[in-house]
Image: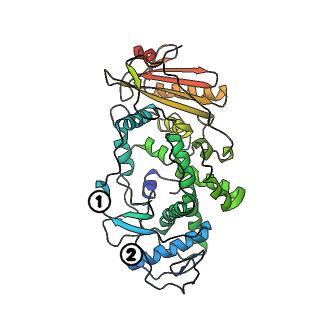
């Protein structure tokens, strides 16, 4: 996915349109030893006698797939160990597929995450909002050795640059791996910063070759993006696609593709490192913990671990999508109010008797000045939600989807936000001492 100029345009390029297996039209003479830049008899420099106006039939898709594999090999310097298979499924089949339903603890954590970021309020379900952002726009993806194409046509159109992106995922799978799954939102976005950044960087290099030396198919029109979706979720989720290419390019500039390959042995720890490539790999995440000071009727979620880390991407997205950074470019994730992030921990709570939720969010900053900058921006956010300030560090949002009480305190370079349904509940969730 390329750096977005318009929000709606990006949803289209989260995935790929493609075709099926082996070539059957006009390859160049196959190299008996294959090698980089050759795949199934096709050379990276070959021209293809195909037309795209009416979509691509099976033999045309096969040829395009093979030539694109050869080109990706040449750009990335890695050879496919096996042919990538491609499946075609209808939109109805895709939407009816079971992607796995999150458990109650996980779903509650997701809801608290997006509520803490003032992105999905208590009147909505964050998982459903996430599905709305991406569900209707996915046109294909790479998974377990195959590219799955979502299309109701037997002759789908094809964007070879996006196909190159997905084929790079196949190369990652065959040679490098996708890294360990991490239990935090920030850690997951950081891992994707390398994985998706590599794929997007290769896609951009592929596009440059199309403009200068390769004969490439015309780019087809993409599907319409949904008219209404949660832009806060969207902005946070696409950060790896936006900052990842520059992150990978920085590593590539330091030591070529060998250095990029080595990065798969040391994935970035945080979105701080993918937003600011100079901080990779030497700037660690601060260890932030929240002691459980809750009263008996408030308990942490039944999830292992019962905490999350929202990261610099979370802080920035919260402030930007709520208008606090209104003069700042939307997709530039570096801002003084968030760039001093050093670590954080979000701990959601649930009241078993009332079913109400609450959370404690503690953030560590590089300096007291950074912490003060964040506190000022966070208080501006609360003010934008019509919060009153009945006492000291306590704020109350009286109505709306974020109607709650908040206590915002700073101790040196550490900020603690306590959220509860009412002012009286704050101490019950987390003591003020």
Element type at mark 2: loop
* Residue 330 visible in the snapshot: no
Between 266 and 58, the residue placed more toward the observer is 266
Q: Position of residue 5 (x, y in %)?
A: 51, 53
Residue under the point 36% across and 47% down: 131
Q: Is residue 185 visible?
A: yes
For marks 2 and 1, the one nearer the N-term is 2
- The Cα–Cα distance between marks 2 and 1, rounded to whole angstroms, is 21 Å
* Label drawn at residue 349: none
Q: How many marks?
A: 2
Task: Assess disc 1: are there few (<14), some (14-19) or many (≥20) residues with their C-alpha within 10 Å of its C-alpha.
Answer: few
Mark 2 neighbour density, 10 Å: few (under 14) some (14–19) many (20 or more): many
Q: Secondary structure at mark 1?
A: helix
Q: For residue 411, what is the image quadrant?
A: top right
Q: Which residue is mark 1?
A: 93
User: Could you say which quadrant of the image residue 429 lies in?
Assistant: top left
Relative image position of residue 220 (x, y in whole percent)? 43, 68
Residue in the picture at 41% in, 68% down:
86
Q: Which residue is mark 2?
A: 56
Residue 163 position, x and y percent, is: 48, 66
Residue 352 or residue 335, whichever sits in front: 352
Query: In the depicted view, which residue is nearer to us: 32 or 131?
Result: 32
Q: Position of residue 200 (x, y in %)?
A: 55, 58
Q: Compared with residue 147, is residue 293 higher up or lower down, i.e. above or below?
A: above
Q: Quadrant of the C terminus?
A: top right
Color scheme of the displayed model: rainbow
> Which residue does the image show at 44% across and 46% down from the upper left?
234
The extreme right residue here reads: 254
In the rendered structure, are the residues bearing label 2 and label 1 in contact, judged by CB atoms less than 8 Å apart?
A: no
Q: Please determine whether, in this image, residue 28 is positioned above or below residue 394.
A: below
Which marked residue is nearer to the observer: mark 2 or mark 1? 1
């Amino acid at each position: 996915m390329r750096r977005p100029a318009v929000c709606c345009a990006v949803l289209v390029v989260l995935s790929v349109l493609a075709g099926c297996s082996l070539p059957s039209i006009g390859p160049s003479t196959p190299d008996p030893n294959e090698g980089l830049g050759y795949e199934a008899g096709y050379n990276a420099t070959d021209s293809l006698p195909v037309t795209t106006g009416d979509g691509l039939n099976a033999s045309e898709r096969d040829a395009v797939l093979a030539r694109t594999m050869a080109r990706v090999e040449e750009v990335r310097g890695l050879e496919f160990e096996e042919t990538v298979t491609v499946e075609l499924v209808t939109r109805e089949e895709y939407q009816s597929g079971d992607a796995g339903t999150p458990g109650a603890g996980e779903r509650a954590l997701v809801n608290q995450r997006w509520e803490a970021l003032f992105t999905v309020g208590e009147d909505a379900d964050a998982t459903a909002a996430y599905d709305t952002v991406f569900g209707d726009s996915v046109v294909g993806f790479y998974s377990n050795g195959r590219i799955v194409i979502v299309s109701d046509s037997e002759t789908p159109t094809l964007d070879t640059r996006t196909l190159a992106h997905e084929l790079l995922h196949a190369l990652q799978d065959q040679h490098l791996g996708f890294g360990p799954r991490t239990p935090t939102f920030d850690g997951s976005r950081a891992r994707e910063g390398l994985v998706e950044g590599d794929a997007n960087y290769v896609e951009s290099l592929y596009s440059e070759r199309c403009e200068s030396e390769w004969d490439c198919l015309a780019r087809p029109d993409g599907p319409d993006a949904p008219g209404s979706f949660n832009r806060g979720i969207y902005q946070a989720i696409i950060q790896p696609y936006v900052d990842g290419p520059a992150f990978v390019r920085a590593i590539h500039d330091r030591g070529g593709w060998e250095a990029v390959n080595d990065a798969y042995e040391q994935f970035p720890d945080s979105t701080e490192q993918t937003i600011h490539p100079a901080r990779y790999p030497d700037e660690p995440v601060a260890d932030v913990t929240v002691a459980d000071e809750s009263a008996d009727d408030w308990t942490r979620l039944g999830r292992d671990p019962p905490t999350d880390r929202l990261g610099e991407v979370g802080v920035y997205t919260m402030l930007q999508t709520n208008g606090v950074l209104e003069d700042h470019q939307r997709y530039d994730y570096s801002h003084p109010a968030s760039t001093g992030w050093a670590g954080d921990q979000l701990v959601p709570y649930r009241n078993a008797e009332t079913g109400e939720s609450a959370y404690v969010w503690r953030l560590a900053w590089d300096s007291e000045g950074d912490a003060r900058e964040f506190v000022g921006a966070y208080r501006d956010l609360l003010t934008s939600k019509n919060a009153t300030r009945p006492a000291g560090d306590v704020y109350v949002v009286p109505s709306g989807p974020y109607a709650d009480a908040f206590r915002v305190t700073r101790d040196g370079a550490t900020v603690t936000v306590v959220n509860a349904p009412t002012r009286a509940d704050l101490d019950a969730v987390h003591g003020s001492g």
